[in-house]
Image (cartoon, rainbow, N blue to C red):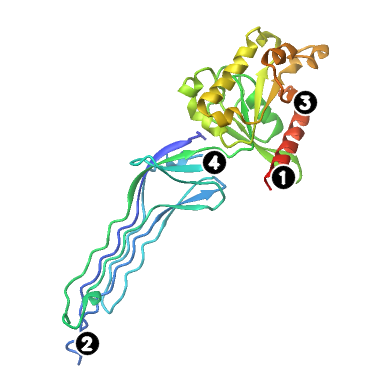
Amino acid sequence: MKFVDEVKIHVEGGQGGDGCLSFRREKFIPKGGPDGGDGGDGGDVVLIADTNLNTLVDFRYAKMFRAKRGESGRGAQCTGAQGADLRIHVPIGTMVFDVASGESMGELLTANEQLIVARGGKRGLGNTRFKSSTNRAPRKTTNGESGESRELILELKLLADVGLLGQPNAGKSTLIRSVSAAKPKVANYPFTTLYPNLGVVRVDSDRSFVMADIPGLIPGAAEGLGLGIRFLKHLSRTRLLLHLVDIAPEQVTEDLHKEVRAIIDELAKFDEDLAERERWLVLNKIDLLPSDEQKRCGEVLLEKLQWQGPVFRISAHTGQGCQELVFQVMEYLMMQKEQKE
């Protein structure tokens, strides 16, 4: 299924029902007076966060959403029925922007959270409302008001605990396949990952976390080069970043530290807070090195980077070192949660 993370839609609240012009007419009551009822309010358009959705693909072709109008009033002072709300299900993590003003209308971050994006029109009044001591037979009514009409941008930011970043072919998709049930496409060419993938990493029966595989970054991504800024935003809600580096012999060059720094620079250009987030270095593909070199691989790289944070040496392909990485990530996330509480 194609991953869609940004769409434009049109929403309209329901039209309010018109008030009724009516007079009571019954046998032996020749002057019964006005009895026209009010109309019903129009329905609202409501967005609902749904745990069963993880993409906005349903909105690729369905662009127009209109709630039901309220029914008109009737005689005998009968009020028209209120128009039904239109409930639209969206993925958790959806942000809503008004196109006309550019302002954020809100975001949906928890299951079943609701956000009214277009209110229905108010009901019209029947002629009963206008009777008075000086106007016993009013013929005045009001029509229902139009509902709110808006163009919206829906933007999805993935809700993941851990984000994988690195250059194309660093092994991010292979890692998420290795430690979770997610099965992203893996191949030996640039930009294999065209759409973000989410995987649930289960550490034991009651502990797990969500990992996001973000398409590879290249210099200029913050300005839109490659797959660019479109996917950098998906890292903004993660609590920990794993920076994968291809340590295979044919990939190790004197400029490898510059490639690592280039990605860090792209994070800073996009969001300073993101660049300062906790980030661990993961040296991948150690299975391609002789066994006596695996434990000390990357020392030159770490020295040139002046790296002070945690470092892990793994093989996403064989699973070597992945279990230790997963346990350390889980411990870090639990510690972060305890500190917040």
Asked whether the residues under the numbered discs 1 and 4 touch, taking CB atoms below 8 Å apart as contact, a structural biologist would say: no
> Disc 3 to disc 4, how far (Cα)?
30 Å
Residue 50 horizontal side relative to residue 30, left or right: right
Q: Residue 125's quadrant in the figure?
A: bottom left
> Disc 1 to disc 2, how far (Cα)?
73 Å
Which label sits on residue 54? 4
Circle 2 residue: 26
The kind of residue tagged 2 is Glu
Mark with earlier residue (2, 4):
2
Mark with earlier residue (1, 2):
2
Mark with earlier residue (3, 1):
3
The kind of residue tagged 3 is Gly
Residue 315 horizontal side relative to residue 112, left or right: right
Label 3 Cα crowd, 10 Å radius (few <14 / some 14-19 / many 20+): some
Mark with earlier residue (2, 3):
2
Q: Nearer the viewer, mark 1 or mark 4?
A: 1
Residue reaching furthest top?
Answer: 254
Which label sits on residue 83? none
The one of 18 and 269 positioned closer to us in this rendering:
269
The kind of residue tagged 1 is Glu
Q: Nearer the viewer, mark 3 or mark 4?
A: 3
Provide the secondary structure element on which disc 1 rests: helix
Which label sits on residue 338? 1
The kind of residue tagged 4 is Asn
